[in-house]
Amino acid sequence: MKICVFGGAGFIGSRVVRCLLSSGHEVVTLVRNQQKGAKLAQLGAVVKIGDLKNREDVRSAITGTDVVINLAVPYYLGRVNLRRVRAMAVVFMRNVKNVVEGAQSVGNIPVILSEGTPIWGDSGKGWHDETSRFNPIDMGRIGELSTPYTMQMLEKGAPIIRIISGLTYGKGSWFEHVVYKLMKKGWFRTYGDGENIYSLVYVDDVAEAYRLAVEKKPLGEAFAIVDDCSVKFKDFCNYVAQMMGKPPVKPMPVWLGRIFSGQVVVEELTMNCRVKNTKAKTQLGWNPKYPTYREGIPAALAEIEKS
Protein backbone atom coordinates (compact mmCIF):
# COMPACT_ATOMS: atom_id res chain seq x y z
CA MET A 1 0.00 0.00 0.00
CA LYS A 2 0.94 3.62 -0.38
CA ILE A 3 0.82 5.53 2.91
CA CYS A 4 1.10 9.27 3.52
CA VAL A 5 2.79 10.05 6.84
CA PHE A 6 2.65 13.55 8.31
CA GLY A 7 5.26 14.15 10.99
CA GLY A 8 7.50 11.52 9.43
CA ALA A 9 10.70 13.30 10.49
CA GLY A 10 9.73 13.24 14.19
CA PHE A 11 10.57 10.86 17.02
CA ILE A 12 7.72 8.41 16.49
CA GLY A 13 7.07 9.34 12.87
CA SER A 14 10.55 8.36 11.69
CA ARG A 15 10.14 4.92 13.31
CA VAL A 16 6.75 4.47 11.67
CA VAL A 17 8.20 5.37 8.26
CA ARG A 18 11.04 2.88 8.74
CA CYS A 19 8.63 0.15 9.90
CA LEU A 20 6.28 0.64 6.94
CA LEU A 21 9.09 0.66 4.39
CA SER A 22 10.65 -2.48 5.86
CA SER A 23 7.24 -4.17 5.52
CA GLY A 24 7.12 -3.44 1.79
CA HIS A 25 4.85 -0.39 1.78
CA GLU A 26 5.41 2.83 -0.13
CA VAL A 27 5.63 5.96 2.01
CA VAL A 28 5.06 9.60 1.11
CA THR A 29 5.90 12.22 3.70
CA LEU A 30 5.59 16.01 3.84
CA VAL A 31 8.42 18.10 5.31
CA ARG A 32 9.06 21.82 5.39
CA ASN A 33 12.53 21.59 3.86
CA GLN A 34 14.67 19.04 2.04
CA GLN A 35 17.21 18.88 4.87
CA LYS A 36 14.57 17.56 7.25
CA GLY A 37 13.54 14.90 4.77
CA ALA A 38 17.04 13.78 3.77
CA LYS A 39 17.16 10.80 6.14
CA LEU A 40 13.67 9.72 5.13
CA ALA A 41 14.63 9.90 1.47
CA GLN A 42 17.69 7.74 2.17
CA LEU A 43 15.37 5.13 3.69
CA GLY A 44 13.31 5.10 0.50
CA ALA A 45 10.42 7.44 1.31
CA VAL A 46 9.07 9.90 -1.25
CA VAL A 47 9.64 13.32 0.31
CA LYS A 48 7.45 16.27 -0.62
CA ILE A 49 8.19 19.83 0.45
CA GLY A 50 5.34 21.72 2.06
CA ASP A 51 3.64 22.69 5.28
CA LEU A 52 0.75 21.11 7.18
CA LYS A 53 -0.86 24.51 7.66
CA ASN A 54 -1.20 24.81 3.88
CA ARG A 55 -4.24 22.80 2.80
CA GLU A 56 -3.08 22.50 -0.80
CA ASP A 57 0.23 21.00 0.34
CA VAL A 58 -1.70 18.51 2.45
CA ARG A 59 -4.03 17.56 -0.41
CA SER A 60 -1.08 17.14 -2.78
CA ALA A 61 0.70 14.79 -0.36
CA ILE A 62 -2.42 12.68 0.24
CA THR A 63 -3.54 12.35 -3.38
CA GLY A 64 -2.96 8.84 -4.70
CA THR A 65 -2.34 7.22 -1.31
CA ASP A 66 -4.34 4.47 0.41
CA VAL A 67 -4.00 5.45 4.07
CA VAL A 68 -2.98 8.65 5.88
CA ILE A 69 -1.20 8.82 9.25
CA ASN A 70 -0.89 12.02 11.24
CA LEU A 71 2.04 12.02 13.65
CA ALA A 72 2.62 15.78 13.54
CA VAL A 73 2.13 16.42 17.25
CA PRO A 74 3.56 19.63 18.77
CA TYR A 75 6.43 18.88 21.12
CA TYR A 76 8.45 21.05 23.46
CA LEU A 77 11.39 20.29 25.75
CA GLY A 78 11.66 22.74 28.61
CA ARG A 79 9.53 24.56 31.13
CA VAL A 80 5.89 24.24 30.12
CA ASN A 81 2.95 26.29 31.38
CA LEU A 82 -0.74 26.07 30.53
CA ARG A 83 -0.51 28.96 28.09
CA ARG A 84 2.09 27.13 26.02
CA VAL A 85 0.09 23.89 26.05
CA ARG A 86 -3.05 25.67 24.90
CA ALA A 87 -1.10 27.27 22.06
CA MET A 88 0.14 23.80 21.11
CA ALA A 89 -3.46 22.53 21.23
CA VAL A 90 -4.48 25.14 18.64
CA VAL A 91 -1.66 24.05 16.31
CA PHE A 92 -2.50 20.37 16.77
CA MET A 93 -6.17 21.03 16.07
CA ARG A 94 -5.25 22.78 12.82
CA ASN A 95 -3.03 19.85 11.82
CA VAL A 96 -5.69 17.23 12.56
CA LYS A 97 -8.42 19.18 10.79
CA ASN A 98 -6.31 19.80 7.68
CA VAL A 99 -5.37 16.11 7.47
CA VAL A 100 -8.89 14.73 8.06
CA GLU A 101 -10.58 17.18 5.70
CA GLY A 102 -7.80 16.82 3.13
CA ALA A 103 -8.23 13.03 3.14
CA GLN A 104 -11.98 13.42 2.70
CA SER A 105 -11.60 15.84 -0.17
CA VAL A 106 -9.43 13.55 -2.29
CA GLY A 107 -11.46 10.35 -1.86
CA ASN A 108 -12.44 9.80 1.78
CA ILE A 109 -9.14 8.06 2.49
CA PRO A 110 -8.79 6.37 5.92
CA VAL A 111 -6.86 8.42 8.48
CA ILE A 112 -4.94 7.15 11.51
CA LEU A 113 -4.73 9.82 14.20
CA SER A 114 -2.28 10.00 17.09
CA GLU A 115 -3.15 10.79 20.69
CA GLY A 116 -1.64 10.18 24.14
CA THR A 117 -3.08 8.44 27.19
CA PRO A 118 -3.06 11.68 29.28
CA ILE A 119 -6.25 12.64 27.38
CA TRP A 120 -7.99 10.41 29.97
CA GLY A 121 -6.51 12.19 32.97
CA ASP A 122 -5.46 10.60 36.24
CA SER A 123 -6.48 6.95 36.60
CA GLY A 124 -6.30 7.06 40.39
CA LYS A 125 -6.23 3.52 41.77
CA GLY A 126 -8.00 2.12 38.71
CA TRP A 127 -7.22 1.58 35.04
CA HIS A 128 -7.87 3.43 31.80
CA ASP A 129 -8.87 1.81 28.53
CA GLU A 130 -10.47 2.92 25.26
CA THR A 131 -13.81 3.51 27.00
CA SER A 132 -12.38 5.99 29.52
CA ARG A 133 -13.83 9.47 29.70
CA PHE A 134 -12.06 12.33 27.96
CA ASN A 135 -10.63 14.33 30.87
CA PRO A 136 -7.25 15.75 29.77
CA ILE A 137 -4.69 17.07 32.21
CA ASP A 138 -1.02 18.03 31.88
CA MET A 139 0.28 17.42 28.32
CA GLY A 140 -2.98 15.67 27.48
CA ARG A 141 -4.42 19.15 27.05
CA ILE A 142 -2.75 19.25 23.64
CA GLY A 143 -5.76 17.22 22.56
CA GLU A 144 -8.41 19.36 24.25
CA LEU A 145 -9.59 20.68 20.86
CA SER A 146 -8.63 17.89 18.47
CA THR A 147 -10.05 14.91 20.36
CA PRO A 148 -13.62 16.32 20.54
CA TYR A 149 -13.33 17.19 16.83
CA THR A 150 -12.19 13.64 16.06
CA MET A 151 -15.15 12.19 17.98
CA GLN A 152 -17.54 14.43 16.05
CA MET A 153 -16.05 13.31 12.75
CA LEU A 154 -16.35 9.66 13.79
CA GLU A 155 -20.03 10.20 14.56
CA LYS A 156 -20.41 11.54 11.02
CA GLY A 157 -18.89 8.34 9.64
CA ALA A 158 -15.39 9.57 8.83
CA PRO A 159 -12.97 6.62 8.30
CA ILE A 160 -10.72 7.30 11.29
CA ILE A 161 -8.59 5.03 13.47
CA ARG A 162 -7.20 6.34 16.76
CA ILE A 163 -3.84 5.22 18.18
CA ILE A 164 -3.54 6.36 21.80
CA SER A 165 0.00 5.78 23.04
CA GLY A 166 1.37 5.63 26.56
CA LEU A 167 4.49 7.49 27.65
CA THR A 168 6.74 6.57 24.72
CA TYR A 169 10.47 6.27 25.24
CA GLY A 170 13.50 5.67 23.07
CA LYS A 171 16.33 7.49 21.35
CA GLY A 172 15.39 11.04 20.42
CA SER A 173 12.59 11.39 22.97
CA TRP A 174 12.13 12.97 26.40
CA PHE A 175 13.83 9.82 27.67
CA GLU A 176 17.11 10.71 25.97
CA HIS A 177 16.98 14.49 26.28
CA VAL A 178 15.79 14.65 29.88
CA VAL A 179 16.18 11.35 31.76
CA TYR A 180 19.34 10.00 30.12
CA LYS A 181 21.29 13.25 29.81
CA LEU A 182 20.45 14.53 33.29
CA MET A 183 21.05 11.13 34.87
CA LYS A 184 24.45 10.93 33.20
CA LYS A 185 25.37 14.18 34.96
CA GLY A 186 23.82 13.06 38.24
CA TRP A 187 21.16 15.77 38.07
CA PHE A 188 17.98 13.81 37.41
CA ARG A 189 15.26 13.84 40.09
CA THR A 190 11.74 12.54 40.43
CA TYR A 191 9.08 15.04 41.44
CA GLY A 192 7.69 14.02 44.80
CA ASP A 193 8.06 10.43 45.98
CA GLY A 194 7.69 8.88 42.51
CA GLU A 195 5.06 6.44 43.76
CA ASN A 196 2.70 7.27 40.88
CA ILE A 197 2.09 4.49 38.39
CA TYR A 198 2.53 4.91 34.64
CA SER A 199 2.05 2.80 31.53
CA LEU A 200 4.94 3.16 29.11
CA VAL A 201 5.82 1.77 25.70
CA TYR A 202 8.96 1.52 23.58
CA VAL A 203 8.89 3.52 20.36
CA ASP A 204 9.41 0.58 17.99
CA ASP A 205 6.38 -1.17 19.50
CA VAL A 206 4.32 1.95 18.81
CA ALA A 207 5.51 1.89 15.20
CA GLU A 208 4.38 -1.73 14.90
CA ALA A 209 0.88 -0.74 16.09
CA TYR A 210 0.66 1.79 13.25
CA ARG A 211 1.72 -0.85 10.74
CA LEU A 212 -1.02 -3.18 11.94
CA ALA A 213 -3.58 -0.38 11.79
CA VAL A 214 -2.54 0.40 8.21
CA GLU A 215 -2.86 -3.20 7.10
CA LYS A 216 -6.03 -4.17 8.99
CA LYS A 217 -7.88 -0.83 8.71
CA PRO A 218 -10.16 -1.24 11.76
CA LEU A 219 -12.14 1.88 10.89
CA GLY A 220 -13.87 3.67 13.75
CA GLU A 221 -11.78 1.93 16.40
CA ALA A 222 -9.39 3.26 19.05
CA PHE A 223 -6.43 1.36 20.50
CA ALA A 224 -4.44 2.06 23.64
CA ILE A 225 -0.80 1.19 22.96
CA VAL A 226 1.10 0.49 26.18
CA ASP A 227 3.36 -2.34 27.29
CA ASP A 228 2.31 -5.18 29.58
CA CYS A 229 3.73 -3.82 32.84
CA SER A 230 2.64 -0.58 34.49
CA VAL A 231 5.35 0.66 36.83
CA LYS A 232 5.93 3.19 39.60
CA PHE A 233 7.77 6.12 38.08
CA LYS A 234 10.55 5.92 40.67
CA ASP A 235 11.09 2.21 39.92
CA PHE A 236 11.35 3.00 36.22
CA CYS A 237 13.90 5.74 36.88
CA ASN A 238 15.90 3.64 39.34
CA TYR A 239 16.08 0.83 36.80
CA VAL A 240 17.46 3.28 34.23
CA ALA A 241 20.00 4.44 36.82
CA GLN A 242 20.99 0.85 37.56
CA MET A 243 21.49 0.09 33.85
CA MET A 244 23.65 3.22 33.56
CA GLY A 245 25.71 2.39 36.65
CA LYS A 246 24.34 5.37 38.55
CA PRO A 247 23.04 5.58 42.14
CA PRO A 248 19.28 5.51 42.88
CA VAL A 249 17.41 8.66 41.86
CA LYS A 250 16.66 11.20 44.57
CA PRO A 251 13.29 12.96 44.89
CA MET A 252 12.71 16.67 44.42
CA PRO A 253 9.90 18.49 46.25
CA VAL A 254 6.93 19.08 43.96
CA TRP A 255 6.92 22.83 44.62
CA LEU A 256 10.55 23.07 43.49
CA GLY A 257 9.78 21.00 40.40
CA ARG A 258 7.10 23.50 39.41
CA ILE A 259 9.70 26.27 39.49
CA PHE A 260 12.20 24.40 37.32
CA SER A 261 9.92 22.55 34.89
CA GLY A 262 6.50 24.18 35.19
CA GLN A 263 3.17 22.94 36.47
CA VAL A 264 2.29 20.93 33.37
CA VAL A 265 5.43 18.75 33.36
CA VAL A 266 5.14 18.12 37.10
CA GLU A 267 1.50 17.10 36.69
CA GLU A 268 2.41 14.65 33.94
CA LEU A 269 5.20 13.02 35.94
CA THR A 270 3.26 12.75 39.20
CA MET A 271 -0.11 11.53 37.89
CA ASN A 272 -1.29 7.92 37.79
CA CYS A 273 -1.89 6.78 34.24
CA ARG A 274 -2.30 3.01 34.32
CA VAL A 275 -3.71 1.71 31.04
CA LYS A 276 -4.86 -1.66 29.69
CA ASN A 277 -3.68 -2.91 26.29
CA THR A 278 -6.21 -5.75 25.99
CA LYS A 279 -8.03 -4.39 22.95
CA ALA A 280 -4.84 -3.75 20.99
CA LYS A 281 -3.79 -7.35 21.57
CA THR A 282 -7.10 -9.05 20.87
CA GLN A 283 -8.48 -6.90 18.02
CA LEU A 284 -5.39 -5.39 16.41
CA GLY A 285 -3.15 -8.42 16.96
CA TRP A 286 -0.45 -6.26 18.54
CA ASN A 287 2.15 -7.87 20.77
CA PRO A 288 5.03 -5.70 22.00
CA LYS A 289 8.56 -6.86 21.26
CA TYR A 290 9.50 -5.19 24.54
CA PRO A 291 6.69 -6.30 26.88
CA THR A 292 8.05 -4.40 29.90
CA TYR A 293 10.42 -1.53 30.61
CA ARG A 294 12.99 -4.10 31.76
CA GLU A 295 13.45 -5.23 28.16
CA GLY A 296 12.90 -1.83 26.57
CA ILE A 297 15.33 0.26 28.62
CA PRO A 298 18.47 -1.75 27.68
CA ALA A 299 17.46 -1.47 24.00
CA ALA A 300 16.93 2.29 24.29
CA LEU A 301 20.22 2.84 26.14
CA ALA A 302 22.15 0.76 23.63
CA GLU A 303 20.76 2.81 20.76
CA ILE A 304 21.51 6.13 22.46
CA GLU A 305 25.05 5.17 23.38
CA LYS A 306 25.76 3.81 19.91
CA SER A 307 25.06 7.17 18.27
Image (spheres, helix red, strand yellow):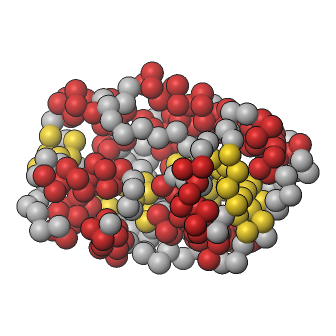
Q: Residue at x 64, y 69 (%)?
A: 44
Vertical placement of residue 125 versus 218, above or below: above
Can residue 291 be seen here? The reply is yes
Residue 51, percent across and down? Answer: 67, 38
Residue 59 in which image quadrant: top right
Outermost residue on the right side: it is: 107
Left/right placement of residue 37 relative to residue 302 reads right
Q: Residue at x 61, y 42 (%)?
A: 32
Residue 137, percent across and down? Answer: 46, 35
Outermost residue on the left side: it is: 247
Vertical placement of residue 294 versus 99, above or below: below
Residue 42, percent across and down? Answer: 58, 66
Q: Nearer the viewer, residue 271 or 1?
A: 1
Vertical placement of residue 124 versus 78, above or below: below
Quadrant occupied by the N terminus: bottom right
Residue 150 in which image quadrant: top right
Q: Residue at x 70, y 51 (%)?
A: 48
Quadrant occupied by the C terminus: bottom left
Q: Nearer the viewer, residue 152 or 249?
A: 249
Q: Residue at x 11, y 52 (%)?
A: 186
Residue 129, percent across and down? Answer: 55, 56
Vertical placement of residue 93 versus 304, above or below: above
Count of numbered circles in the view: 0
Can residue 276 be seen here? The reply is no
